[in-house]
Image: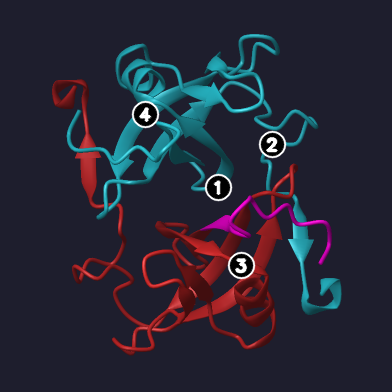
Chain colours: A cyan, B red
Amino acid sequence: MQDIKFDSRGLVPAVVQDADTGEVLMVGYMNEEALKRTLTTGDVWFYSRSRQELWHKGETSGNFIHTAEVWKDCDSDTILVKAKPVGPVCHTGNKTCFFQKLTSKDL
Amino acid sequence: MQDIKFDSRGLVPAVVQDADTGEVLMVGYMNEEALKRTLTTGDVWFYSRSRQELWHKGETSGNFIHTAEVWKDCDSDTILVKAKPVGPVCHTGNKTCFFQKLTSKDL
């Protein structure tokens, strides 16, 4: 698979970005099978590190994420998926998982 | 530090996104000190896993990345930096590290 460098756990981080707005929605982890399914099924798949199983994003909430484009980085150890989310991506109900801003006051 | 969940190596992945264009530029790793410096110095810092040392991005190339906003995700285990790069972010000279597209033919 195109020299993708999976880590010692067999995973690569995958950034999901809204293909229309450019908003960064979440970061998940993919194993080889999740990456294959993301490239072939039209939906974004991850490997759940907590449940230790393949995770079809949206399988419980119905908020699937449709794959638009998949990119790898220069080192082939990170994936970027440009995608079209059906609904809120975050389990909190937020559109994006990145809804908490940090400042130097948080130090 | 705001309950950031650093992993067993003391690191969190950090996505760097162009604050003006929305383009995802790179993913690096930060330890607590790199995150502190990113929040306080105005520049993006990482922890280099290969060199095992703090890494002031741009220190050799001059292509510093100026911090605009820092966000954490819902699980507090991933950072998103919206930033203004001085020059190309990738060591290959590309504007972004994500310049290689994957398709199902790459499987």
The residue that mark 1 highlights is A23
Q: Residue at x 77, y 73 (%)?
A: A103
Q: Residue at x 66, y 40 (%)?
A: A96
The residue that mark 2 highlights is A95
A77 horizontally vs B3: left or right: left
**Same chain for the residues at labels 2 and 1, yes or no?**
yes
Q: Residue at x 64, y 82 (%)?
A: B37
**Same chain for the residues at labels 3 and 4, yes or no?**
no
Distance of mark 4 from mark 1, alpha carbons?
14 Å
Asked whether B13 falls inside the magenta stretch, the response is: yes
Residue A54 visible in the shown view: yes
**Same chain for the residues at labels 3 and 1, yes or no?**
no
Q: Residue at x 58, y 19 (%)?
A: A52
Q: Is residue B13 above or below residue A65?
A: below
The residue that mark 4 highlights is A68
Q: Nearer the viewer, residue A86 or A5?
A: A5
Badge 4 amino acid: Ala
